[in-house]
Image (cartoon, rainbow, N blue to C red):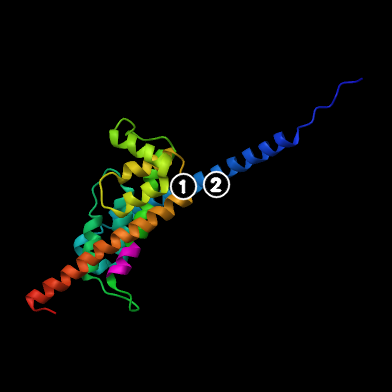
Amino acid sequence: MGGSVQSMSPPDEKGTVMNRRRWVAWRLEYSLLIFVVALITAFAFAFFYFQVEVSRLKDYGYIGVFAINLIGAASMILPMPAAVSTVGGGAILNSYLGIPTFVLVGVVAGLAEALGEFTGYAAGYGGRIIIQERPEYQWLRRWMERHGVITMFVMSVLPNPFFDIAGAAAGVVRMPLGRFFLTVLAGKILKDTYMAAAGDFSADILSGLLGLG
C-alpha cells in the first residue's frame, strides 16, 4: 500500500484548540495589564506635575482622594500620604445624595488603591521583582498558591506594609487578573471606609469638645 496520510486525532486537535485559547487569553490579559500600568504612570506624571497637596484636600475634593490613593498604591518606592488623605477626607469632605462622607471616601479611595495595585501585580507577572529572597515573600507566595483569594482579601482589608509583596506574589503565581482586582477592591473599600469613618467620627467628637458643632 502507498504511504498513509496521518491526521490529527480528536484529542490532539482539542488540545491544540485549548492551547490556542489559553494563549489568546494570556495575550489579552497581559495587554490589559500593560495598558492599566501605562495609564497609572501617566496619571502619576500629572499628579506630580500639578503638585497635588494633601494640605489642600478640601479644594481637590474626592478627585484629590482618588489621585493620592491611586499614586500611593501604585508607588512601591516613593512614600505617599494615602492613609492621611483617607482619614482626612472622611473628616472634612461633604456628603452627596444623602450618602455619608465616610462611605463615599471609602469607595473612591478603595477603587483608586485597587487600580494602583496593578503595578505590583504586573511586576510579579512579568518576573521583574527583587524581593524573591525576602522571607515575607516566600511565605506569602506559598499562601497565594494555596489560598489566593483569602490571602489577598486579608492583606487588603488590614493596613500593613507587606501588601506590595503580596501583590507581586499574586502576579508570580498567575492569579487571574479579574479575581485579583475584585478581591483587592472589596478589601480596600472596607479598609478605607472604616479609616474614613474614624476621621469622620473623630472630627465630630473634636467639634463637640470645642463647641463647634
Residue 28 disc label? 2
Q: Residue at point 87% right, 21% down?
A: 3
Three-letter code for the amino acid on which mark 1 is drawn: Leu
Instruction: From the image, give the main secondary structure of the stretch colored magenta.
Output: helix
Query: Which mark sits nearer the N-terminus, 2 or 1?
Result: 2
Q: Which residue occupies the foreground of this view, 69 or 186?
A: 186
Image quadrant assignment for residue 121? top left
Q: Give the image location of residue 179, x and y in percent.
A: 46, 51
Residue drawn at 76 percent across, 32 percent down: 8
What label does residue 19 carry, if any? none
Please state the total of marks drawn on the protein image: 2
Which residues, given as a range, are shown in magenta?
Answer: 102-108
Rendered position, 157 above or below 101: above
> In the image, 172: left or right of 8?
left
Q: Residue furthest front?
A: 146
Q: Residue 33 — which label?
A: 1
Asked whether residue 65 is drawn in magenta, I would say no
In the image shown, does 199 or 47 lie closer to the viewer? 199
**Which image quadrant is residue 132 in?**
top left
Q: Are marks 2 and 1 in contact (CB under 8 Å)?
A: no
Q: Which residue lies at the image location 43% right of the left edge and 50% below the top edge?
A: 180
Q: Residue 155 location, x and y as percent?
A: 32, 49
Quarter of the image where the C terminus is located: bottom left
Q: Position of residue 124 (x, y in %)?
A: 40, 39
What is the x, y in percent for residue 206? Answer: 11, 71
Crowding at dot 1, Cα within 10 Å, few <14 / some 14-19 / many 20+, comes out as some
Q: Is residue 89 above or below residue 169?
A: below
